[in-house]
Structure formats: structure tokens, C-alpha cells
Image: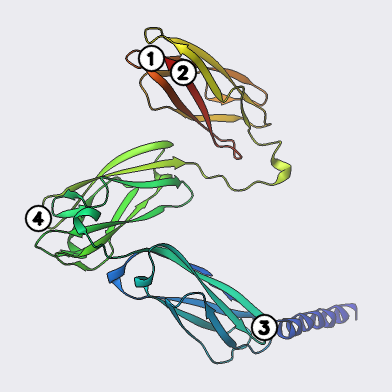
Amino acid sequence: MIRLFLFLFSGLLFGLQGYAQQQGPSKLVWKVNRIDLGTILQEQGVQSVAFDYTLSQGGAFAIQEVFTDCGCTTIDYSKDSIVLGQSGKVLVDFDPSSAAGFFSKLVLVRGNKGQVQDSLFIEGIAVPYPSNLERNYPVKLGDLGFRMKKVNMGDVFDNEPKVKFLEFFNYGSKPLEKKYIQVKSPDFIQVEQVQELVRPQERGLLKISYAASMRSELGAVADQIQVKWGAAEPIELSIIADLFDYFAPISKSDLEIVPQLYLAQKVVDLGQIASSAVRRQTVVLSNLGKQDLEIRKIQQNCSCLVLEYPKNVLLPGEKMDLNLIFDPIGRKGIDQRNIYIFTNDPVNPVQLLVLKSRIN
């Protein structure tokens, strides 16, 4: 009897939950609500994207109206009503000819008499066609023109690859077909041509993907890659990046537990010094956390500065000296050296120590 009662009671609860799902306010679950189109050349024309949604709560649902904040977008969407569990689409066409540089366009979806009001976004970088090709693509490598000599990937974290689109202009007399591109690069750098064909006197895009997780390095790095099409001579590109560990957000209660690097000084001012005398200075590093602090890397970019420290791990509460040995020979005037300390401190994984001086 008791089992029968529990069975009937469970069925009643399940039915009430289902009824509440159907009778509550309508709710849509979007597959994504933000789409990054990447870099778009003006001559690539209108770009089309689709936002997919599923009705997860409420009764019959239909989109009533869709607004955009720009005349550069046109919208189409599913007009039919859907019921719980069914899906629909909002289609957006974006015309890059009216944009320049970074853009973020809003698409506002309303339905069921205001029960739903969801915001969608399309983003990217629009590149207008230049009025002066020689000025915009002055760096010539083989038959290709580029804006700069180096490709700067910027900050790259090890939790996901960083993607950048590189513009080029085909100054040559032969078309560049995607299927014939050949790339010689480290495993952590992938390169592909975006367009199927870039004709002579046309612009193209290379998609460069950098996976920091595949490279056991931190801080400023530089790499060389080679790209060629078919039997043509390869061109060499320099790729620079700043690599960082990614740390997920931590709870407030964990702030006192995690490793915590403390610098007794963040700026060391040597004052006026002679260019003939080597100067030594010590900075104390401390671990104020309750877990081991790993010194993963200490980086500086001058052979005039030597860094010495006895260990790479500080136990909770432990301290150590970081010795700075600065040789100013051949230098004169105001001098500043930046020292970057990379650790497993999730709140401040990179800290900057500055060494200043005025060299006579």
C-alpha cells in the first residue's frame, strides 16, 4: 500500500513538473548567442550566420519581431509556432562594406507578447578596400604584400588556441589556390588560406592558429614559419606572441589557500650610477599562501642583467632572495629594465619588477 502511494505521489510530482514547464513563461535556449566572424575583407561581400534555438519552457512559442542596431544587417527567422522541445533559427546577413575595424552588432529577439527578449551579437573586424595598395601593404615578401614584417598574436593563453587573420595582397601574376598552399611551421602553429582562390591583384587572408598548450614556454616568444604555393619560392613570416598560463576563477574562500607571491619591492631604483661599475641588488620573494608556490619563469630581455635565485618552489610561508646583477657598461642616460615573474599564483600569475637607473 505504501509503495503504491509513493508511486502515485512520484507520478503526480512528475506531472506537475511537466505542467509547470509547459505553463511557465517561455524560455529559449540558444546554441550560441554570440558569433565571431573573424576578419572580413570588404570584397568578400555579405556574410551569413545562423542562430539556433530550442524552446525549453512554456507553451506554444513564436517570434513576434526582431530588431537590429544597424542597417548593415538583414534578418530572417522562423515564423511558425513551436512547442516544448522544438527548434528554430534566426538568420543574419552582415554587409561589411559599411563597417571599418572592430564591430559588434546587436540582434534583439522578442516573442510571446514580451515573455522573451533575448540579445544576440555578431562580431568581427571589417577591413575596407584601401585607396593606396602600396601604402597599405608596404612589406613585400616574394609576390605578396603585407602590412607589417611580423605577425603579432598578442596574449595567448594555454586553455585554447588563439586565432588571428593575416591580410595579404597578391602582387604577382599567378592565382593562389587554397589546395596548393604548403606550410612549414611548428606543431603549435597552424596556417590555412581562407579563400579558395586569390587572383592576381586581389587581397587574401591567412588564418593563423596558435596553441600555447603545445609549447612549454611562457612570456615573449618568436617563431619563423614558411608558406608557399606549389613550386613557388617560400616566403618566411615571423610570428611573435606573449604566452601565459590560464587559471580558472577561484572562490573567495580559496583566496587565503592558494599560492600567493609577494614582492618586497616592485620598483628598484639604483639612482645615479657609473657605466663602469656592476651593481648588485636583492629583492625578497615570499609565498604568503598555504600551497607551494612554483616559480615557473623569470624573464628579462637584456644581456646586461643577470638574475640569480636558489630554487623554483617556495613552501607556504617561505622566502628567498632574487639577486639582480646589472652591468651598465656601454649605456648612458635613463635606463629601465622590466623583469617578469611567472608563477602558479592564480590571482597574480605574472608580476612585474622594475629596475631603474640613471647612468653617467
Q: Is residue 79 above or below residue 190?
A: below
Residue 86 location in percent, x, y? 57, 84
Mark 4 and mark 3 in contact (Cβ < 8 Å)?
Answer: no
Q: Residue at x 26, y 62 (%)?
A: 130
| Secondary structure of the residue carrying numbered label 3 | loop
Mark 1 and mark 4 in contact (Cβ < 8 Å)?
Answer: no
Q: Is residue 201 above or below residue 214?
A: below
| Secondary structure of the residue carrying numbered label 4 | loop
Nearest the eye: 159 or 339? 339
Spatial CA span between label 3 and label 4: 61 Å
Mark 2 and mark 1 in contact (Cβ < 8 Å)?
Answer: yes
In primary-sequence order, the first of circles 3 and 2 is 3
Label 4 or label 1, whichever lies nearer to me, is 1
Spatial CA span between label 3 and label 2: 64 Å
Q: Residue at x 59, y 35 (%)?
A: 345
Label 3 or label 4, whichever lies nearer to me, is 3
* Residue under pointer 1: 328
Residue 217 in view, yes or no:
no
- Residue 114 is labelled as 3
